[in-house]
Amino acid sequence: GDGRPELQLNVDRERASFYGISTAEVISAVRAVFDGQVSTRLRTGDSEVDVTVILPEEYRSQLQNIGEIMIMSRSGALVPLLQVAEWKEEMGPDMIRRDNQSRVATVTGDIHGRDLNSILRDVQKRMEKISIPDGYTIEYGGLSQEMTESFSSLTLALLLAIVLVYMIMASQFESLLYPFIIMFSLPPTLIGVIVGLALTGRALSVPAFIGIIMLAGIVVNNAIVLVDYINRLRKQGMDRDEAIATAGPVRLRPILMTALTTILALVPLTLGIGEGGESQAPLATVVVFGLTFSTFITLVLVPVVYTLFDDWGRKFGGWFGKIGRRRRSKKNDDVEPSTSV
């Protein structure tokens, strides 16, 4: 909004120094004229009343009288204000806000009909075209700042979830390679998430990001079922390629049943039906589309990755993928063979 008219006083420091007057003394004299100055206290019974000396209202209301304000120099001489300062009337701010002792001007707005991220990008493009004077900075707060902080925390939570899932699988498989192969089911999930949000027209919000974190622990189930059965067949003496070809059709039904139970259960929530459904719909959308894409792509991608890493493991000595197997063989070597008659 428009500011208020104010009188700005600029002190000529060189001339004031010539008369032996400091800037503080000029300010003190002007304040005494307009705001008054307490000269003494008058005691009336049990209380005291301040005695303030101030110029009459009719004198203070005339701007031409400001220059006649007398200021006493250090030598005792009286110097009129117009000799050491000049003043002009301008429009000043209606209110001064400060943050960490710096002046701040806040511009706020509400969101309507669009998502926060796209609006923030448009605002930033407009602000890039504005020439900002030296000493001025632009900061984005409010919902945009909260969104940035939330996504930073959720990204850290996603990375921690992936690490924990990998550690649990490594302890169960007793190998570092097989959990790594299973983790390749996560990238197709992101493809499904992007496609799902694009088709439904929903933005990548905080609930949607929470859905991605949930997917980090859900989508690996299908790959675990497949890789575990492949390893079982190979332990029974079956060739690797034959084990992969056998495990795919056998584990197809359990994988589809596991995925469909989750997907179909979240379909009503994806539609956003009912009160408060709009806030939960992005989470369900991310889980449904991410799990769907991961399920079908995992059936093809995981066997291929399994074959590649198994070939590399044989080429480089097989240490990376056979830690668990070596432990078991060493344990078996310590047992003496039994004899029977």
Image (spheres, grey):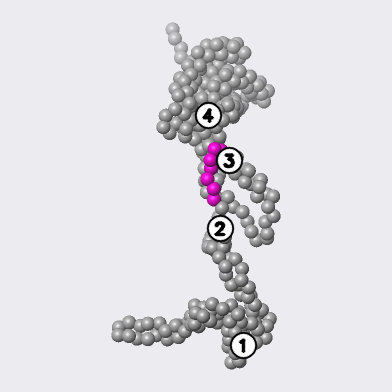
Residue farthest left in this picture: 45
Q: Nearer the viewer, residue 60 or 170?
A: 60
Residue holding disc 4? 286
The image shows residue 269, relative to residue 35, as above or below, that is above
Residue holding disc 2? 1
Which is more foreground, mark 2 or mark 1?
2
Judge whether residue 113 is colored magenta. yes
Which is more foreground, mark 1 or mark 4?
1
Q: Nearer the viewer, residue 341 or 168?
A: 168
Q: Amino acid at mark 4?
A: Val
Q: Amino acid at mark 2?
A: Gly
Image quadrant containing the C terminus? top left
| Among numbered discs 2 and 4, the one appearing first in the sequence | 2
| Among numbered discs 1 and 4, the one appearing first in the sequence | 1
The reply to whether discs 1 and 3 touch (Cβ–Cβ < 8 Å) is no
Q: CA distance from mark 1 to mark 3?
A: 61 Å
For the record, the magenta segment spans 108-114
Residue holding disc 3? 117
Tell me which residue sits at (53%, 79%) in the image.
60
Residue farthest bottom in this picture: 76
